[in-house]
Image: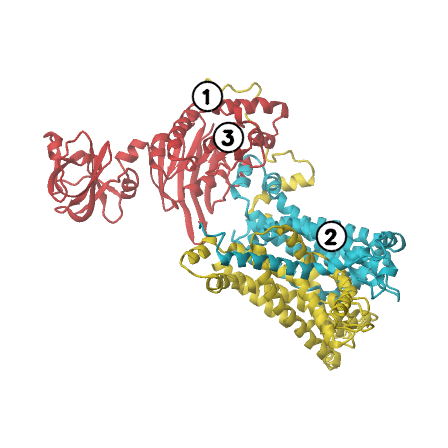
Amino acid sequence: MAATAVRPGRVWNRVGIYTGAFVFSVLCGFPFLWAVITTFKQDADLYNPNHNPFTFTRGATLSNITDLFETTPYLHFIVNSVVIGIIVVGITLLLSLPAAYALARLSGSWGRRLGIGIFMVYLVPPTLLFLPLSRLITVLGLQDSIWSLVVVYPGFTIPLSTWLLMGFFRSIPRDIEEQARVDGYSRLQAVIRTVLPLTLPGIFSVVVFSFTLTMQDFIYALSFVSSSSRMTISVGVPTYLIRGDVFYWQSLMASAVIVAIPVAFLYNAFLDRFIQGFAMGAVKG
Amino acid sequence: MRLGSGGRRPDGGSAVAESPVAAGGRGLWARLSGSYLMEREGVLGGALLLPAVLYLVAVVGYPLVLSFLYAFSDVTTGSQALHLVGLQTFERAIRDPVFLQALRNTFVFTAVSQALVIVLSTALAFVLNADFRGKWFVRMIVLMPWATPVAISSVVWLWMLDSIFSPFDWFARVFGLLGPGDHIVFLGRSGLAMASVIGLQTWRVLPLATVILMAGLSAIPRDLTEAAEVDGAGFWRRLFEITAPLLAPVMMVALLFGIVFTFTDMAVVFVLTGGGPGNATQVLASWAFYKGINGGNLSVGAADALFMFPVLLGLAAIMLRFASRAEVG
Amino acid sequence: MAVVETRGLRKRFGDTVAVDGIDLLTGEGEYLVLLGPSGCGKTTLLRLIAGLESPSEGDVLIGGRAVTSLPPRARRIAMVFQSYALYPHKSVSRNIAFPLAAAGVPKDEWRQRIHWAASLLGIEHLLDRKPRELSGGERQRVALARAMVREPEVFLLDEPLSNLDAKLRATARDELKQFQQRIGTTTVYVTHDQTEAMGLGERIAVLEHGRIQQIGSPREIYEDPANAFVATFVGAPPMNLLQRNGMLVGFRPEHFLPESAAGGRAGLQRLSFKVGRVEYLGSDRYVYGRVPEVDPEAKVVAKLPSTVPDVVPSGETVPFVVPLDALRFFDRDTGVRKPPPPGPIA
């Protein structure tokens, strides 16, 4: 092991890793870099093909961002997305916490099969469901309302959340809740007072992932909502803000960056636990 | 109660009186959670599972059944009535020349992008599995394409591939590949448009596959590769004889997820090309949207979308095989 | 304080029967140990008494009251798990307070009660710690304090010493016994370790295949095993069993001595012992070999205290003796204890 630092194979290994890291960073990050640069450019600078697109010939400006908030319904989009996200996360937890617990603890082999079945629901694509759903939404009188999305989104957040939570519940020793039952609590109380506090980190990551998942949807929001004041970010930006002949690219890029960066941060922060939960869901309990 | 010297019982510490409902039975919740019925595994399990199952049946199961019903009927957004017309709708859907193109495009779109994803993500997973300076930053950058809502990142690509102001035009001009005043028309020519759509989808799914592969890589016991190293196996031999076979099932999982998400995606095509030019990049999902929502023909749209179903069913079957094998192993 | 009783208790998991018709009755304040190898059903029996499993058949009574259909919280029991199952997110005092909160004890009484339980177990200095900051022995005490704080009628202990290292186990066993003697609550204790069972139990119930093989004082269990299973399970090394005339003849290794060491007492059975291997263990020597004239197949062990002079060379046949009253007889097929047959065995 003493020779590790000087072996030529190791040196090439390091070079390879750093080269790979650089290439992939550029590959994945370039569109965002481009969007950030565009956000701060003045019109005369941006719309001149002879200018180097990566430098500021005219100086940077924040007016594109203020325009975005002042002259477009972008703020509405954000509020709508956040409100929908929060309510959907609430519904998701309300339904998937009990279901995940039941699958993790109360059922034998049929429970495992049902668990896999619920996960399979996650794989049923929205593109297969949006047509009948758009009609059901009309029948329910929810067309062109954010409530239509609130009702539909748990259809994909519940399966994923249930699967993840099932894994987290399985990682809590059974003894703990049995002890609570012996100590004088009913089964439900035991779960609420001992298992849930211990699953809190897992629950938190499920909240984050369900929320970002609702931001991802495009086709439902596109099919059910038509007024700009009720659009989500995902639909508002590519349809409402792009509509018309004049594209305000700097504001558009600002709108994208403002969403992408915080979501990416959140996602990154909880990724490890997500992977953990994903794997644990598959572990036999 | 006999107590020795150390065990003086506290005054007033009467032996705990226990009512059947331990925490005082006020309100429906207390009564429900306190009732002995809810202690029975079957009853409690059913009660806890039922709401989620019912919800999923209502917003996924029922619409799925309806979509079949629609495809065998002549329902439109305008008419409330639903007449079953057998296979007529499918016939109408198939006879549309755009349909066949969309079907072909869907397969090309999926196959090429996922082939690229699996190659690139394997390399990327190896890079991110190593320790190096600034790793957390690289990981964050690499994850962004998947974390960003697809419609949003598609808008960014739309601008990046702009017919006049694309930065790639500028690069090409700097290297003398493009004359002044000339432009690469990424989205206006069928071949390049398809390549652009595939490029975006590859870029977007790459992080997901990478993350799954990283989980797989970290699960390979280190002493296994170290033992091989001690035995004198070089990097490539270790890669092909130890890492690759152990990673293969995880790769399969990553591939299956990638295929499911790509085969059924419409946002990328919808935002970037709108299916154009002509219908050169039209896929089944976007075509179903144009027919069903924009054209108001729910039945034909549903029929178009249903052509995705056999493939999905096949993928689900493979996944179930995996799941049951994992259960045995 | 109350007695625990089970009547015809049976528990099936799918096709396997974990507990197969158990009738058990403890005395008031008795220390009853359930002893058996792993998989014998002892833990399932304890969980049935606790109400963590519901029986397929039969009844559980605590203090004369049928509790079969009651959940654990309504049974006035306390249980200590093998893992101690301390709530990792609560401090020691919160752990101990947890059963009090469930029982609706007013909050101003908690402090007093917690200190009472903690002082009894000598863990008052640990009250503000979290479980992960405690050693194994300290965890066990916290678990006991939590179990006793609401003064249950019955203690159920599931292998509470098995997570401690061997050195700690002896002192912990001693403390456990003193503790129980002081509070005098009926206790059912599950273990697979016969030293624990012998040391702690007023009575021991030996379980195998979900059935009680024998129930009695440690002395009865050891000296008068009811069948061949109990005879070989209890005692280390186990009782020697030789096949002879459709019977199993058993004797404890410590009763099997060289004739020269027996001092010419009367009432001895003489056996020629073909010595194989001698194991020196300090206070004792284990001598392994066979008695070909009675049963050439059976392996036989003699446990010689170090006070017996070393007269057993390997490979030779040495005259050994067993006191006749130390011989136990069992049916060859059923293993059930039989009266001694007339006449010598060899």
- The picture's colour for chain B is yellow
Name which residue type carries label 2. Ile
Task: Please state which of the two labelled residues, at mark 3 or mark 1, is closer to the viewer.
Answer: 3
Of all chains in the rendering, the one displayed in cyan is A
Identify which residue, B97 or C235, lies in the foreground.
B97
Task: Please state which of the two labelled residues, at mark 1 or mark 2, is closer to the viewer.
Answer: 2
Name which residue type carries label 3. Val
Q: Is residue B111 left or right of residue A283?
A: right
Q: Which residue is disc 2 drawn over?
A: A261
Name which residue type carries label 1. Arg
- Res. B283 in view: no
From the top left corner, tell me how far across and down residue B226 is, in percent: 45, 55
Q: Secondary structure at mark 2?
A: helix
Q: CA distance from mark 2 to mark 3?
A: 48 Å
* Circle 1/circle 2 CB separation < 8 Å: no
**Which numbered tag is attached to residue C142?**
3
**Which numbered tag is attached to residue B2?**
1
Of all chains in the rendering, the one displayed in red is C
Q: Secondary structure at mark 3?
A: helix
